[in-house]
Image (cartoon, helix red, strand yellow):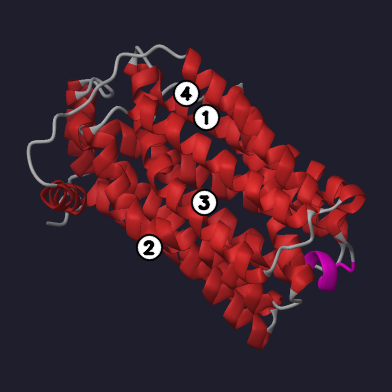
Amino acid sequence: MGQSISLIGTWMQRLAIGWLAYKLKESALILGVVEFSGQIPTLFLTSLGGVAADSYNKHRILIITQALAMLQALVLAILVISDNITILLLMTLNICLGIINSLDMPTRQAFLIEMIDNKDDLSNAIALNSSMVHFARLAGPTLAGFIVAASGEGMCFLINALSYIAVIVSLLLMKTTPRVTPKKTSAWLQLKDGFHYAFGFPPIKYLILMLSIVSLTAIPYMVLMPIFAKDILHGGPRTLGFLMGSAGTGALIGAFYLASRKNIVGLGRIIAAATFLLGAALTAFSFSRTMWLSQGLILLAGLGMMIHLAASNTILQTIVSDDMRGRVMSLYTTAFMGIAPLGSLLAGSVANKIGAPATLAIEGSICIVAAAAFAYKLPALKILARPVYVEKGIIPPIESALQSVSELSVPPEN
């Protein structure tokens, strides 16, 4: 509940930053650059954050990172309310938050398993976590749209700063048994071991590669939303809030769907289908010029994106060994959040030349192709992952053997 309150503030800040950047410099390129500045630290630093998560107390790390994020939001609020904000200061504070998130996100992903007594509940817990995130994604932008229209962007940043109190208090009240792996080698060697482990096992490798493609091409659609809200649909901050809220509604529906599932069997096919839905919805959205149709399509895009992210997270959390969890989840975070700034910068640059609708149509089409490629590789990946599922008790050995025999016609790749 504490994190839910905090995340509503986070999504309010995210919308307000985009609107403020576009108001200061009405440029698609500047929108991409501002988004790039906030996420680029995750590309280079998140892997080190994963090493820290595997080596130190995750609970303490999260308390520190949340306190620093609160300070960043407070400074941003003061600068905006006092009318001293500039694009350069906005980018600088975004970079600071990106550095904080580089440590916070992989630690939070790895900490999830420490809050669960029964690993059979993992997929439901991840879906519940995703429900929380995307409920905030629904409520935050919608509230922010009205608050920006009534009181300005600074109030959104101040509310976000205050919202961190809830999650910090929750963390301080929490009692868990820390699972810390003592550091046996240097950070560089631990980092190297994590890369070899992840990319040496095809199911993990292809999940991360698939996520990277989606992060480069589809997830940056959010950075173009102010352009669609203002120039394509001829609205204002409320229009932007409704669009972002529709995406959050779709994501929340996807989270409820995953939470209702009893196990992870079949999630590979769901990832392929969700990625196809995401690409198709974004492509269709790029051609829409009416608000009701745009909201419906962006809802489907949010549904596809959420299912893709949460299902990938669930599979990775299930098949990874505990001593590598922080490092593998740092790669997940890098693929999710670290590649996205490159996509934001690319989307802003391309949109500046050919327009936002054409840019989004191209990116959606790439997602559709990626979904087809992943579906083609899926049978071989399932065979390679099945022994891990059997070892963890997810699939009974007899059922596994029968299914493996039925799939022998699909040769696994080395």
Disc number at residue 373?
A: 2
Q: Name which of mark 2 and mark 1 comes first in the sequence.
A: 1
Q: Which secondary structure is most common in the magenta stretch?
A: helix
Please name which of the two marks, 2 or 4, marks the residue nearer to the observer.
4
- Where residue 383 sits, quadrant-wise, is top left
In the image, taking residue 348 as reference, residue 391 lies left or right, namely: left
Q: Name which of mark 4 and mark 1 comes first in the sequence.
A: 4
Q: CA distance from mark 4 to mark 1?
A: 8 Å
Location of mark 1 (residue): 129
Query: Residue 385 at x, y = what percent?
Result: 22, 39
As drawn, 384 above or below 99: above
Query: Residue 29 at x, y = what percent?
Result: 63, 78
Location of mark 4 (residue): 124
Q: Residues within 10 Å of mark 1 (few under 14, many from 20)?
A: some
Q: Residues within 10 Å of mark 3 (few under 14, many from 20)?
A: many
Query: Residue 219 at x, y = what percent?
Result: 55, 59
- Looking at the rendered image, the quarter that the N terminus falls into is top right
Q: Name which of mark 2 and mark 3 comes first in the sequence.
A: 3
Contact, CB < 8 Å: mark 2 with mark 4? no
As drawn, 410 above or below 116: below
Please name which of the two marks, 4 or 1, marks the residue nearer to the observer.
1
Q: CA distance from mark 2 to mark 4?
A: 28 Å
What residue is at 27 percent from the left and 40 percent from the top?
52
Q: CA distance from mark 3 to mark 1?
A: 21 Å
In the image, taking residue 321 as reference, residue 21 lies left or right, namely: right
Contact, CB < 8 Å: mark 4 with mark 1? no
Task: Tell me the SS state at disc 4.
Answer: helix
Please name which of the two marks, 3 or 1, marks the residue nearer to the observer.
3
Q: Name which of mark 3 and mark 4 comes first in the sequence.
A: 3
